[in-house]
Amino acid sequence: MAHDPAFVDALLDCKISNGFGNRSRAVADSLPYTTASLLAAAQEALRNGVGAISPTSGFHHARYAHAAGFCSLNGIAVAAQNLPGVRVGLLDLDQHDPDGVREIVEHLGLDLPILHGRGTPRTAERWLQQLPATIIETFIDCDLLLVQLGADPHVEDELGAGWLDDEQLRRRDRAVFKTCRAIGLPVCWNLAGGYQHDADGTIRPVLNVHDASLQECSEVWL
Ligand SMILES: [Zn+2]
């Protein structure tokens, strides 16, 4: 419903490259689970009226008929297409533009408002101040907000050009959760990108950003 069926078949059969540029059976086998996880979380957010989390990544660069940028299937478009009668919005706070979602929205003529947040360290404070009003203005007519809480806008992210520090990322997340709660807009969020490593080569710095998102979410939701 969100992709060229021939592309999906070839991807799941490992006949074409996935978003990582390989034909790994493990990646192919994970795709029904990651996409369904986002859909299930979206359904739960609608059910409880507040929100739900999908601990997944790797959706927003996947196009209608090809994988790209660590993204194989576009779980965002899949979720939106499987929620009939629900007006879904996308707040994408990953560092990178949701170009795959935009392409699918255009290809299929979907009504799916998209807001991508990106700035520089100099514009960060003003952007944070304006974020609640921007969310309300863009998504007031939506029934559900899908949110990509990427860790790669971090100033020390290894893909570069990051613009938010730890404390600003926390305020970003708090603003999303508080604003949506205040206007009664259910939120379904997932992890999205993050490329930092510590001295031992582990991704602990990325997990710290995701943990902070979870803490901010708990403060508001519970
Ligand atoms: Zn990214």
Image (tube, rainbow, N blue to C red):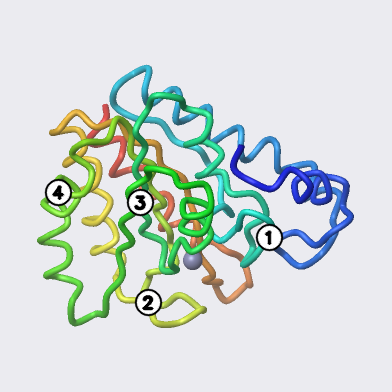
- Quadrant location of the C terminus in the rendered image: top left
Cα gap from disc 3 to disc 1, whole angstroms:
30 Å
Tell me if 138 is positioned left or right of 60 in this view.
left
In this rendering, the answer to whether 84 lies above or below 108 is above
Dot 2 amino acid type:
Gly
Q: Earlier in the sequence, mark 2 or mark 3?
A: 2
Cα gap from disc 4 to disc 3, whole angstroms:
26 Å
Q: Tell me residue 3's x, y (percent).
A: 64, 46
Q: What residue would you read off at disc 2?
A: 162
Q: What residue would you read off at disc 4?
A: 137
Q: Marks 2 and 1: CB-CB under 8 Å? A: no
Residue at screen point 31% across, 65% down = 166
Dot 3 amino acid type:
Ala
Cα gap from disc 4 to disc 2, whole angstroms:
26 Å
Cα gap from disc 2 to disc 1, whole angstroms:
24 Å
On residue 212, the disc is 3
In this rendering, the answer to whether 17 lies above or below 191 is below
Query: Disc 2 or disc 3, which is closer to the eye?
Result: 2
**Judging from the image, what secondary structure is the residue with disc 3 in?**
helix
Q: Earlier in the sequence, mark 2 or mark 1?
A: 1
